[in-house]
Amino acid sequence: MEFNVNHPILFVLVGIIIAAVLGQSTYFLVKAIRRAKELGIAGSTVKSTVISSAIFTIAPAIAILVGVVALSKSLGLALPWLRLSVIGSITYETVAAGNALTAAGLEASATIVDPSIFVSVLWVMTIGIAAGIVLVPFVTKKIQNGMLKMGMKDKKWGEILNTAMFLGMISAFLGYVFCDVGLVFSGDTSGLIPVCVMLVSAVVMAIFGGLSKILRARWMEDYALPLSLVLGMASAIPFTAWLR
């Protein structure tokens, strides 16, 4: 049987997994509603909470959809659908998939026709993100307690540590953005494409952040990330035509 990244059997397998996750979510939703009734919480309050939560999941869902579309060219629809619907992150999955494809000698936009490469990309995307599931139960409490103790002893150094950890995480992704900028010195300007896309996304994020404070509309903050992703990826089209 010829391998196809969009083979029906892949959609069946992914559908079974996602159905199980949806079933679990539904189970806990029903349990939560029943518990709310036992605690005497008004039905109108429960209903409004469920509706508002459902509405505000639209924002991150847009970002997830963008990630699925971005990865579908090379990985098909089934694998990105699975990775970004269960336990995944668009910032991690796209980088992991791109690095795995590059290591296999393919471009990030190339469609995979070799099943061994497809499985390798799957493992790279899965093992990296699954590490958190394993580590969180064992190390998170110790790290959190250590940070709380430091914050109680010296608030200033506690804030510095939190900021340093955040910047360390961001630096990993910034390295991926700027890694090919040096190609400019050899006459290849394609390395500037990720930088330009990042700047567009940053400007959009800053605009929404400023507007949310000026207009006092906190709901805009929830849509800042997905819109910055969408507009940033859209800007990659003209930047690619210009710089490549």
Image (cartoon, helix red, strand yellow):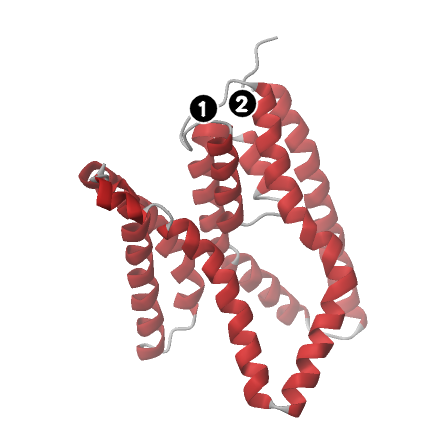
- The N terminus is located in which quarter? top right
Residue in the picture at 69% in, 36% down: 17
- The image's mark for residue 111 is 1
* Residue where numbered disc 2 is placed: 5
- Number of other residues with Cα within 10 Å of mark 1, as a class: few under 14, some 14 to 19, many 20 or more: some
- Name the N-terminal-most of marks 2 and 1: 2
Q: Nearer the viewer, mark 2 or mark 1?
A: 1
What amino acid is labelled 2 in the image? Answer: Val
User: Closest to the observer: 29 or 16?
Assistant: 16
- The image's mark for residue 152 is none
Q: CA distance from mark 2 to mark 1?
A: 8 Å
What amino acid is labelled 1 in the image? Answer: Thr
131 is higher (above) or lower (below) than 142 = above
Image coords of residue 142 (percent x, y): 75, 71
User: Closest to the observer: 197 or 17?
Assistant: 197
Q: Is residue 231 something that shows in the picture?
A: no
Image coords of residue 131 (percent x, y): 69, 50
User: Closest to the observer: 7 or 26?
Assistant: 7
User: Closest to the observer: 23 or 30?
Assistant: 23
For this orientation, the residue located farthest to the front is: 186
Residue in the picture at 45% in, 50% down: 63
Q: Is residue 144 left or right of residue 122?
A: right
Q: Are marks 2 and 1 in contact (CB under 8 Å)?
A: yes
